Amino acid sequence: MDVRFLACHARNSISQALNTWQIPIRTKTNDTSAYDNLSRKRHSESPLFYSAVLSHFPPSEYHTASFSKPSSRQNPMLNIGPYTLPNRVALAPMAGVSDLPFRRLCSEFGAGLVVSEMISANPRLRNSAKTQWRSQHDGEIAPRSVQIAGSDPQEMAAAARYNVARGAQIIDINMGCPAKKVCRKAAGSALLADESLVEAILNAVTAAVDVPVTLKIRTGTSPGNRNGPTIARIAEDAGVAALAVHGRTRACGFSGQAEYDTIANIVATTGIPVFANGDIDSPEMAAAVIRHTGAAGVMIGRAAQGKPWLCGQIAAHLETGRTPAAPTSEEQMGIIHRHVSQLHQFYGDFMGVRIARKHVSWYLAARADALAQRKLFNQLAHPQEQLHFILQLSDIEFEKELAA
Ligand SMILES: Cc1cc2nc3c(=O)[nH]c(=O)nc-3n(C[C@H](O)[C@H](O)[C@H](O)COP(=O)(O)O)c2cc1C
């Protein structure tokens, strides 16, 4: 059969499949029957997409990746307030990355929790385009965790109330970001140096809302002051429902390796669930970090860029000891196409095209021709050109597979 015909057929299959995808709705409980029904519906309505994009997660494995079974001794369920997470893997909040289209994708592929980009607590910024984009949530992702950043306790409390009114089901507080200042005031991890201010912020926010409040921190302010365990105790006393700890201090920025001993100390110090975070880039590493720290879960940041399926793979591995295969390169093209198309819809043509560039560069990073393809892609200025480019890449992949 003519290779061109087959490549064209594959491209049509991807396009067709992209239009028919159904997303399972997460339930607040661990009841998976709703998912089972949707999964069956999806399979019958969209066998093409199911086989084209999710064949690497056969139903049983994908199911396991998405919903943890009832508690076993090795795999206790992870609760945040009233929410039982489907598994123990969270997508980290990443400004400029974990926007709604990316969160949606990671959630579909099995992340147990996805956290929004940080939203400033400053009320004067509420109407900025950036804050408006960051404040959009999707009814299909639950629980919806929204991160707020700021340093004034009352402003943070008001921001928590404001975001809950707009759909947040969990308020996450940013004390982990190394940015020197947010809104010209110390915020993010800079707050870790002022334990009484930390306490005031946490008390104000937990008193302001009746949804669970979570906290993201670093291990301390500097290698000489790893006060993470003290902060964790303050958080627990204030009624914080879960912690995420990046295994670096504020002074470390992103340099060196994350260390997990302080995270283990924090886990030993507190009774609330802790997500270990920092440099975790594979299912095996996630399992090792959980063994080392005793953390209830892991949080994945940079390693998920260009790999929205990674959190789901890690979740499946932690649950079953087996790692579902990553999507084939042809399947990845379908995922990229849909992601880029959603970025265009979400941000509009001008910003969507620009934001798509970094995601596509992450997706293509493992390819031998990554540099050349990225250069070409970055020259494209129109949504349709970008989508056409991705379809062409899928032709190339398909031809390679046929030639192999
Ligand atoms: C591009 C980028 C943006 C980030 N934005 C935030 C943020 O908005 N809030 C936050 O708490 N942490 C933020 N972080 C930190 C991450 O959540 C995470 O703690 C850090 O990247 C370490 O995890 P990793 O090694 O898995 O990437 C950001 C990190 C990156 C790379």
Image (cartoon, rainbow, N blue to C red):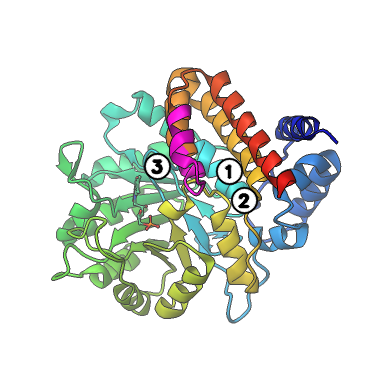
Tell me if residue 363 is in the magenta stretch: yes
Mark 3–mark 2 CB contact (< 8 Å): no
Residue position for label 1:
105
The reply to whether the residue tagged 3 has its Cβ within 8 angstroms of ligand 1 is yes
Q: Secondary structure at mark 1?
A: helix
Out of 212 and 274, give the one closest to the viewer.
274
Q: Relative to 220, say whether 179 is above or below.
A: above
Give the alpha-carbon distance from disc 3 to disc 1, as whole Å.
Answer: 15 Å
Alpha carbon distance from label 3 to label 2:
19 Å
Contact between labelled residues 1 and 3, with CB atoms less than 8 Å apart: no
Q: Which residues are magenta?
A: 361-376
What residue is at 56 percent from the left and 37 percent from the top?
A: 138
In which image quadrant can residue 128 be found? top left
Whether ligand 1 has any atom under 8 Å from the Cβ at mark 2 is answered as no
Q: Nearer the viewer, mark 3 or mark 2?
A: 2
Q: Is residue 383 magenta?
A: no
Q: Quadrant of the N terminus?
A: top right
Eyeballing the image, is 243 above or below 35? Answer: below
Q: Which mark is residue 117?
A: 3
Amino acid identity at mark 1: Leu
Q: Main secondary structure of the magenta part?
A: helix
